[in-house]
Amino acid sequence: MSTIHTKIKQVVRAVLGTEGFENKEDVVIEDGIVNTILAGLYLGALGGFLIYAVLGYGAANLSYCYNIAIGSPQETAYMFAALCFLFPYIYYPYYAIMLNPLCKKTNLVASVRK
């Protein structure tokens, strides 16, 4: 049995209140339960990584397009895109509040009146 399985069994016993008490009866924890917990942890970590990667890609793409549209050099656009990929949760609110060219009154009013 691997050390990961042993550690998970110890955590389950501690949560159930059977670890370290003399009068408590030992709870049998099957390997199937441990494998289910491990699979859930791996799938949760993979799902979290995929969500973060998709959000990061979206922020990087949005930042790159914005910087190219305002005439910044390509090196600057790549640098900001890399930063936005790493910190999408900071960039999205900043873009929505400060930078979004679609929500500026001049662009919105001009496009509606045409």
Image: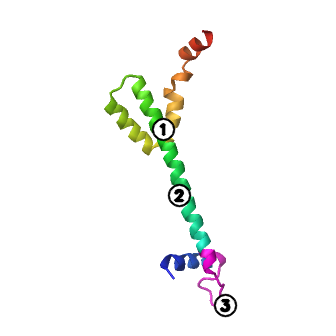
The image shows residue 56 at horizontal and vertical percentages of 48, 43
- Indicate the quadrant containing the C terminus: top left, top right, bottom left or bottom right: top right
Q: Secondary structure at mark 3?
A: loop
Q: Which residue is mark 1?
A: 59
Q: Secondary structure at mark 1?
A: helix
Q: Amino acid at mark 2?
A: Leu
Mark whose residue sits in front, 2 or 1: 2
Q: Residue at x 49, y 33 (%)?
A: 94
Up the image or down, 2 lies above or below 91; here it is: below
Q: Which residue is mark 2?
A: 46
Up the image or down, 47 lies above or below 81; here it is: below
Mark found first going from the N terminus, 2 or 1: 2
Q: CA distance from mark 2 to mark 1?
A: 20 Å
Label 1 crowding class (10 Å Cα cut-off): few <14, some 14-19, many 20+?
Answer: many
Mark whose residue sits in front, 1 or 3: 1
Magenta region, residue range = 15-34
Mark found first going from the N terminus, 1 or 3: 3
Mark linked to residue 23: 3
Up the image or down, 1 lies above or below 114; here it is: below
The image shows residue 44 at horizontal and vertical percentages of 57, 59
107 is within the stretch colored magenta: no
Q: Amino acid at mark 1?
A: Ala
